[in-house]
Every structure is written in structure tokens, then in C-alpha cells.
Image (cartoon, helix red, strand yellow):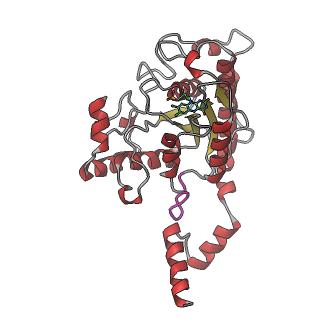
């Protein structure tokens, strides 16, 4: 683990290029329990058995939710099809969390959500923020950056789980979002993807982090699920295996995951329509294509120089 962390921190350029190829083509080798030597991959870290969706250590409290015997079964959520839907592939979900701690409750919460989403038929990839450098535009080819961007482009929705620290989301969480460009010309890694927000607290229940995450989702042009989860005193809500103990907080996480799956299945049908904008159609007609932010800034600079 330590070796993996160090390797990803000092990743040489060759490794970065290798990661670029791997992450950009989103090859299957990221579907593993552990990351590669360069820190990329390990998207199924939430599973205990790499070949079994929704598996996890310890008490499997999720499987009984799908046994079909009780009134509270989640089978309908798994089978849900949005009216008039044209897409029938598994919803592609990227799960982000905001802490590097060995026993991180925001990661444990993210992992429980990942298992629930897999059990409801989603294709889930959990991103490990370990080794992601602080945003610096001169190192955009860092393997962890390339991986994060490729995963977001791949996704149809995100799950965001951050701790609350000093009344805010963590730097570790915000840094991941800061690495995601709103657009690079016509490629938009976040726009139109759904989002659902969650937080863990050390103290009593609070909503500062989820409110902030919701605002962040708006900035990233991601429609955000109305339901959310805030786990108070998270240190007493998880057992030694890292599984959530039975509680109202756990029931809420199930509600959130259920709504999020339906929300994503509905919204992905219309993502392209929502992304189709007057101002961009106008720009494409005038310039032949959408300009990148850097091109827009350069054009503004040129205009400023000309008017001097
Ligand atoms: C510097 C610092 C500030 C914190 N501030 C808050 C806070 O404002 N509100 C809160 O509920 N918990 C706060 N906590 C507790 C954390 O939210 C809690 O320990 C959480 O589990 C950390 O996330 P992690 O387990 O994913 O690492 C703070 C913890 C630290 C270390």
C-alpha cells in the first residue's frame, strides 16, 4: 500500500503516458480490487470478491434487500425503466470520496453506496484520490489526473461523499473536482451527468458539506438528486469490517441510492438535450466549432492588445 502511494506520487512521464493510454481507453484492468503500481485502477475496492457485484466484507446486509420476499424489496428499483427509455445499458457511475485516511468513514459510506448501486444493476467505478496531486495545470498528464478525467467522461453520474471539516468539504474532495475541466472544447467531463451528495460528521448531524457539494454540482452543470445523506457521529455507525450498522442513517442511504438509480436512468435519456445550448450553437455556427477556455482567453487578450 505504502509502495503504491509513493510510486504514484513520483510517477515518471513514461508511467503517465501508460496511464493515459489505459485510462483514456477505459480498459478493463481498472476493474480490480487494488490499483496498479502507478496508483491507477482498483475501481472495485468496495468489493470483497472481485467477481461478485455488491460483495463486501463482514455482514452482507444488502443481499436480503433483494430477496423479493418482503414488502420492502428493492427489486423494483433494479428493474426500473424510465418511460420511453432508449438506453438499456447499466448506468455508469463514478464514486468519489474525500479522505485519504486508512479508516475513512466517507470512503466506507461511498463503498456501501457503491455496493447498493451495483446490486441495483449499475456499472460502478470507485476512484481512489490517493496520490492525486494538488491541482497544477503543468502536470495534467499525471496518471491520477488522466484517470480521473477519463472516469468522469465515461460516467453518466457521480456519487460524492465528503467529510465535513471546519464546516466545509475537505480539500481532498474539492481538489478532485478542481481537476475536472468544465469543458475542453466539445468534451465535457461532468456536464449533464447526475450527482448525489453525502457527508459524514464527527459530531451531530450537519448539512454544510452536502449543501456545498450541491452548489459544486451546479457549477459543474450536474443535475443533483434531491435526496442526500448526512451521517452524524460516523465513528459509531460502522462496524469493524467497515460495514454500516443497522440504523436510520443506513435506511436513508438505501433511499438515496434507490432514488439516485431512478434519477440517473431518467436523466441520462435527456443529457444531450440539456447540454444543447443556444450560445454554443451560435458559437459553433460562427467559429466552426466550440472554443476551449484557453482559446477564448487568448482571443480576449488579443482583443485587449488591439484596443490599446
Ligand atoms: C480538522 C478537522 C475538522 C473537522 N471539522 C468538523 C466539522 O466541522 N463538523 C463535523 O461534523 N466534523 C468535523 N470533523 C470530524 C470529521 O468530519 C470526521 O472525523 C470524519 O469522519 C472525517 O472523515 P474521514 O473519516 O472520511 O476521514 C473534523 C475533523 C478534523 C480532523
Q: Tell me if residue 91 can be seen.
A: no
Q: Position of residue 105 (x, y in %)?
A: 52, 25
**249 displayed left or right of 135:** right
**23 displayed left or right of 62:** left
Q: Quadrant of residue 115?
A: top right
Residue drawn at x 72%, y 37% as measured from the top left: 82
Residue 68 or residue 100, whichever sits in front: 100
Q: Which secondary structure is most common in the magenta stretch?
A: loop
Name the residue at the front extreme.
166
Residue drawn at x 53%, y 90% as measured from the top left: 306
Q: Tell me if residue 255 can be seen.
A: yes
Residue 280 or residue 168, whichever sits in front: 168
Residue drawn at x 57%, y 90% as measured from the top left: 307
Question: Quick check: 115 above or below 129?
Answer: above
Residue drawn at x 40%, y 44% as measured from the top left: 132
Q: Quadrant of residue 308?
A: bottom right
Q: Quadrant of ligand 1?
A: top right
Question: Quick check: 60 above or below 145?
Answer: above
> Which residues are the magenta region?
182-189
Q: Position of residue 184 (x, y in %)?
A: 50, 62
Q: Position of residue 199 (x, y in %)?
A: 61, 32
Q: Position of residue 267 (x, y in %)?
A: 68, 44
Does 188 appear in magenta?
A: yes
Residue 21 or residue 166, whichever sits in front: 166
Amino acid at each position: 500500500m505504502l509502495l503504491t502511494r509513493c510510486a504514484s506520487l513520483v510517477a515518471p512521464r513514461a508511467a503517465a503516458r501508460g496511464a493515459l493510454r489505459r485510462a483514456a481507453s477505459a480498459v478493463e484492468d481498472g476493474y480490480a480490487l487494488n490499483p496498479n503500481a502507478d496508483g491507477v485502477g482498483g475501481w472495485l475496492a468496495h468489493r470483497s470478491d472481485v467477481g461478485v457485484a455488491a460483495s463486501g466484507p463482514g455482514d452482507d446486509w444488502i443481499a436480503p434487500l433483494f430477496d423479493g420476499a418482503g414488502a420492502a424489496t428493492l427489486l423494483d428499483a433494479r428493474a426500473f425503466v424510465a418511460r420511453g427509455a432508449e438506453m438499456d445499458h447499466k448506468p455508469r457511475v463514478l464514486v468519489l470520496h474525500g479522505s485519504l485516511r486508512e479508516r475513512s468513514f466517507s470512503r466506507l459510506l461511498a463503498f456501501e453506496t457503491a455496493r447498493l448501486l451495483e446490486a441495483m444493476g449499475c456499472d460502478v467505478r470507485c476512484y481512489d484520490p490517493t496520490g492525486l496531486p494538488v491541482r497544477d495545470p503543468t502536470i495534467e498528464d499525471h496518471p491520477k489526473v488522466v484517470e480521473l478525467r477519463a472516469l468522469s467522461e465515461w460516467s453518466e453520474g457521480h456519487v460524492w461523499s465528503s467529510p465535513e471539516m471546519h464546516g466545509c468539504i475537505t480539500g481532498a474532495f474539492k481538489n478532485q473536482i478542481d481537476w475536472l475541466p468544465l469543458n475542453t472544447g466539445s468534451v465535457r467531463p461532468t456536464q449533464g451527468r447526475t450527482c448525489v451528495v453525502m457527508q459524514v460528521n464527527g459530531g451531530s448531524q450537519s448539512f454544510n458539506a452536502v449543501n456545498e457539494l450541491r452548489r459544486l454540482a451546479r457549477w459543474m452543470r450536474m443535475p443533483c438528486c434531491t435526496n442526500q445523506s448526512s451521517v452524524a457521529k460516523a465513528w459509531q455507525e460502522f462496524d469493524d469490517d467497515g460495514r454500516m450498522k443497522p440504523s436510520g442513517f443506513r435506511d436513508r442511504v438505501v433511499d438515496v441510492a434507490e432514488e439516485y438509480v431512478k434519477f440517473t436512468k431518467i436523466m441520462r435519456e435527456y443529457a444531450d438535450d440539456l447540454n444543447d445550448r443556444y450560445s454554443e450553437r451560435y458559437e459553433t455556427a460562427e467559429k466552426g466549432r466550440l472554443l476551449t477556455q484557453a482559446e477564448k482567453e487568448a482571443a480576449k487578450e488579443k482583443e485587449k492588445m488591439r484596443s490599446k
